[in-house]
Amino acid sequence: MSEHEEIKSSTKAKKPKFNWQVIVVIIVLVLALGGWYYWSEVRTTEVESFEATTLDSVEEADEVITSLNIILLPTTDKRPTVGKIGNPAGLQNTSPEFYKDAEIGDYLLFYSNRVVIYRKSENLIVNFAPNFGPVPVAPLDEEQ
C-alpha cells in the first residue's frame, strides 16, 4: 500500500451507524402524545356538554339531591355535581344508550362512582350507570 493510499483511507470519514433505538423512542413518544391528546379531547367534549346545562342555584341542587335520596340509597359520598339537561340531543351524541330517554329539564347527578339521570317532576330515576371518568366540576355560583 502506498503512502498516498494510507493517508486517503485514514482520512475517510466514518459513516455514522443508524441508531434504531432513537427511532423507536421517537415513535413511541409520538404515539403516546397522540393518544393523550385524543383522550383529553374526548373528555373535554363530554365535560363541555355537561357545563352547558348547569343549574342556576345551590338551593335547586339541594332540592334535587334531597328528592333523589328518598328513592335512591344515599352514598357516603361527597356531594354530587348536579346539572340540568338543556339539550338531550347533544348528550345523546356522546352516549346514545345512556341518554336515550333523557328529556329537557331532567337532572344529571355525578357521584364519584355513578351517574344518575333523575326526573324530579315525576320523582323518577330515568337511568343510571357507573362513573368511570372524572367527575365534572360545574361552575355553580354559591351566592346566587
Image (cartoon, helix red, strand yellow):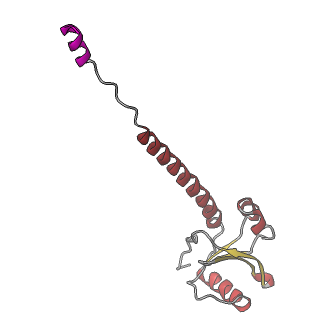
The answer to whether 110 is drawn above or below residue 32 in the figure is below
The answer to whether 34 is drawn above or below residue 82 in the figure is above
Q: Is residue 41 magenta?
A: no
Q: Quadrant of residue 123?
A: bottom right
Secondary structure, magenta segment, majority class: helix
In this view, the residue in front, 65 or 71, is 71
**Quadrant of image for the C terminus:** bottom right
**Quadrant of image for the N terminus:** top left
Question: Which residue is at 62% across, 87% downward?
Answer: 75
Q: Position of residue 64 (x, y in %)?
A: 68, 84
Q: Position of residue 17 (x, y in %)?
A: 37, 31
In this view, the residue in front, 12 or 96, is 12
Residue positioned most to the left: 3
The answer to whether 56 is drawn above or below residue 2 in the figure is below
Magenta range is 1-11
Q: Quadrant of residue 127?
A: bottom right
Q: Position of residue 18 (x, y in %)?
A: 40, 32
Q: Position of residue 61 (x, y in %)?
A: 63, 81
Q: Is residue 90 left or right of residue 25?
A: right
Question: Which residue is at 56% across, 74% downward?
Answer: 140
Residue positioned most to the bottom: 70
The answer to whether 133 is drawn above or below residue 45 in the figure is below
Q: Is residue 101 left or right of residue 54?
A: right
Q: Quadrant of residue 76?
A: bottom right
Question: Which residue is at 49% across, 43% downward?
Answer: 27
Count of marks placed on residues = 0
